[in-house]
Amino acid sequence: MKKLLYSPKAAPYLFIGPFILTFAVFWLWPVGQSFLMSFQKIIPGEASFIGGKNYARLWNDRLFWLALANSFRYMICTLLLLIPVPLLLAVLVNSKVGGSRLKAVFKSAMFVPALTSVVVAGIVFRLIFSESGFALMNSVVEVFGYGPVKWLKNDLTGLGALLTVALWRWTGVNMMYFLAGLQAIPEEYYEAAVIDGANAWQRFWYVTVPNIKPTVVYVVVISVYGGLAMFMESFMLWGGNNSPMNIGLTIVGYLYRQGIEKNDLGYASAVGVVLLVVVLAINLTQLTASGMFKKEDK
Amino acid sequence: MQSPRKMAALVGVALALGMTGCGGDGDEPGAGGSSQTSGVDQGASDDATELELWTFVDLHGKFYEEMANKWNQANPDKQVKIAVNVMPYDDMHNKLQLALNSGEGVPDIVDIEVGRFANYIEGSPALEDLTSAAAPYAQDVVKARMDLYSKDGKLYGLPTHVGTTLAFYNTELLGAAGVDYTTIKTWDDFKAAGEAYHAATGKCFGTADTAAQWQEALLMAQLGTDWMTPQGQLQVNNDRIVQAVSMLKDLQTANAICTIAGGQPDNEEAFGEYNAGNFAAAIMPEWFMSRYLSYLPDLSGKIAIAPPPAYPDSVHTTVGGGGTGTAVPSAGPNKALAAEYLAYAKLSLDGNIMIWDSLGFDPVNMAVWKDEAVTHNPDNDYVKYFQNNVFDVLNTLTEEIGYLPSTTMQGMPNINNMFGTTTLNEIFENDVDVKTALDQAQADLKNELGQ
Amino acid sequence: MSAIGRPDAQRRPGGIGQPDGIGQPAPAGRPGGRHRRGGLPLTVFMALVFGAAGILCLVPFWAVFVGTFQDGNMLIRNGLNLKIDFSQANFDNYVMLFTDSGNYFRWFANSLFITLAQTAGTLLVSAFVAYGFAMYEFRFKTALFICVLVIMTIPFEMLMLPLYIQINNMSLSDSYLAIILPFLASATTIFFFRQYLRGIPRDILEAGRIDGVSEYGIFFRLVLPLMKPAIAAMAILNAMASWNNFLWPLLALRSPDKYTLPIGLNTLLTPYGNNYELLIVGSFFSLIPILVVFLAFQKFFIEGMTAGAVKG
């Protein structure tokens, strides 16, 4: 025992033991199980191999493709909104104009939404986007002369509601990331640029942008991940997994529907396996492109 | 970075908040939350067997507790104590599925909504056969409702009500618009009344439902068709279903019916619409009465009940709609007692009188329907609320109540889901052609069910 | 799972592609002296932008606060607005919250318990593993570390079904272990700690060995104290994720008295429960402790967030 405690050879395996265990029991085994089940038809108490039938069905499943499209659309929209807006705000906060008091208060106000749970946020936004004429969003559009809108019954307005929740919850967080990135840019770079006669725009373009790039890459990576895995926002906004015409159906929602709601574990596993492959492909491409693995090798 | 002391303080604050939080969690009998107690006295002694009951309707829970009191008085040797767990509809059904699959953590008794029932009797059901428990009461109970929850000669769930589909009219609104509901017999009458009502008020008469199929079910019974053939083959786009849905679409085009907030009459948003006088009619199963009483107190005395509009040559005038099949999971430790209590609560005359008195449902034990002392009891809240007595209407329909055998057939949950989320929205919200939408539904469902 | 057991994994801490020595606090604002006041129009413009964005962020909080004084069913019917109708407003919902809210405070306590247990456990185990990765050379190290990276990029949701079957096989369903155990070795936290530890010279190990300290003694006595800043940052993020975790506890837990606050609140969102008042006031009340903790330790939170970000 004592030898074990003092052996630098055995030590690393004990240190990373918990990870190996977790990985084997809660990742590898489930993935293998998922793969196996995806070739089975499973009804309570009975499982039988049916070859690739689940995958064939998936290929013809309009809803699966809809879910996939919804998730990708949401992910791309969050990228388009949640990168430029927080970046702009971060640049403003980081600029020398304006009082630091005001900025501190502003940072806090922006950050507070990130602290609320999706459940509470979903309940609140569901009621704000209620189709009743009294609800907040409808009172707002009424000012512009539009009648009550059925926000959560139409595709685009439904997407708008989802994006509103995303924008509300994540703008502050992403802004913090960008702010940290901006503040890490040495002041000297700007001073040098000023000496070289660069104007404000040139300073932004030639100093800020290249230096903030790693942060942007990072935020893109987590946004892709978060966008594709989105489920809770939709689940809460529509009070469940069944939105009108499935406008809020996401890939995780579809997995939940097939596996939990319809209890079709075989088919749900096929959905899961396909998604796993898709997400892995995207992420690995992304990580390789951003030089992640290269960094690890050295 | 900050000192560890600050971190410790943070944890301390969280803990302190937790402690004060716990302080509130005393022996308060809470009605809120999905709590175990509702304050109903079950008259159970300390050695009563505790039975865990899951339901998705708060009011059902109270009913079971009141019935436990009666049961305990009649059966002092095998007393029960019902622990009710109210969960949201989807949640409860999903959790039940997971529990039945694993055989772990199942309740003793569970309310399963009829639209989801098929999921639980697939393969080899993990539910008890209740035939023998129901035997003492079977002769008085509407057989069609028992058949709904049966498979291969075994009875897996006990019905709560018949759910006769009726028409509810707000006579105050109708009177102001000069419409007389008693003249509405056929769908043509309904359309004419709706048009007149819209012309007079600018508001809609009835509802075009996108999230439920009560009206479609009614029309299908009237036209003598069903979602699936008796062999279980999908036929959601057959001629008569196209005819039925097209008729509803025509009503919508004529402004006789409109889509309602919440997608169908039975939810809080829709109650708001009714309360605000935005709709004057509801074609809903009988149990919608209880919603009026609970959620629309302002409309008391203004609502009249009538047979639903029909075709002149309807096969059946009306249909039994909705329902809850209450089941006993086989993995439950007290399944024999649970089955016995359950049959008493839901099928006995006592139980059925209570179902009418407290829930306002049209009970499956037909003896209740004929008992004027019960049905016309002037102290009954439902008798007081509505302009006319529901049993006066129901008793004219006893021979006219059809039912759709597909209701609990394999695939029905998928049909409900497809229509309630997609198909009806496309038709009534997005003006997709009826035939196109139904063909699409048929194709998608075929793929989903592997037909 | 990668994202510390939370379904909405967008705010994953621990930057990918961080250079060594991350986890140092970000320069906390520039010294005030360097602020040069811009022209008046610019200042006004900034105040307007900040004011508008800040207010928009706070509007939903106001809406739910206003909602707590109204009848629950009316809220579901009419939606949330910003106006208070004083003729209808009352404190009934608060009275109900403290006298007749069933399991609400139980859920509250459960959530606190799980948050504390999960955060403490995850930090300890993840630091342990990260130390192994950072300080030792061993066979399959690269392969195993790539596993960490891969797990970080797989949303847990994709595996929730087999994972659910797995915890059933292990007879863990409906227990808090089921919620905590699979995510104790959190890939994201491991990655973050490992990056941080790489900035600590390995000489410290040698010094410890020479002094006769065991390998574990070195970790607990010498290294762990050095990791405080990194641990603090990860504590905030893990605690936030755990407090708000929804999907996995929803699957794993069955008994209402074991529910966490988010799951419990969600059960109130049902047309047949007569609980909309508790839903609103309970939702609002659940925000208060987080807000109090946040306002008290604001700087700490923001530094925790930004410590996870990439810098240069």
Image: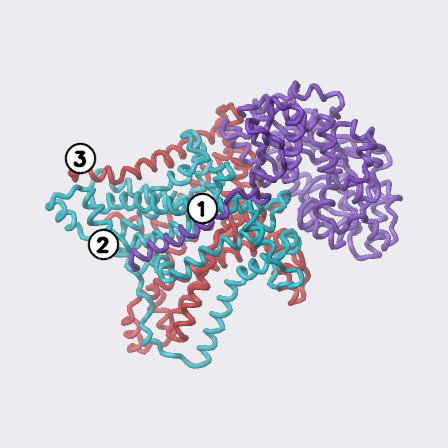
Please state if C162 lies on the left or on the right of B33 as rendered: left
* Chain in red in the render: A
Discs 3 and 1 lie in a common subunit: no
Q: Which residue is mark 1?
A: C111
Which amino acid, mark 1? Ser
- Kind of element beneath mark 2: loop
In the rendered structure, are the residues bearing label 2 and label 3 in contact, judged by CB atoms less than 8 Å apart? no
Q: Can residue B440 be spotted in the picture?
A: no
Q: Which residue is mark 3?
A: A4
* Chain in purple in the render: B
Give the label, 1 or 2, closer to the camera: 1
Q: Is residue A144 above or below residue C286?
A: below
Please state if A219 lies on the left or on the right of B67 as rendered: left
Give x and y (percent) for residue B372: 83, 32
- Kind of element beneath mark 1: helix
Identify the mark nearer the N-term, 1 or 2.
1
Marks 3/1: CA–CA distance: 39 Å
Chain at numbered mark 3 = A
Image quadrant where one finds the C terminus of chain B: top right
Q: Is residue B37 above or below residue C235?
A: above
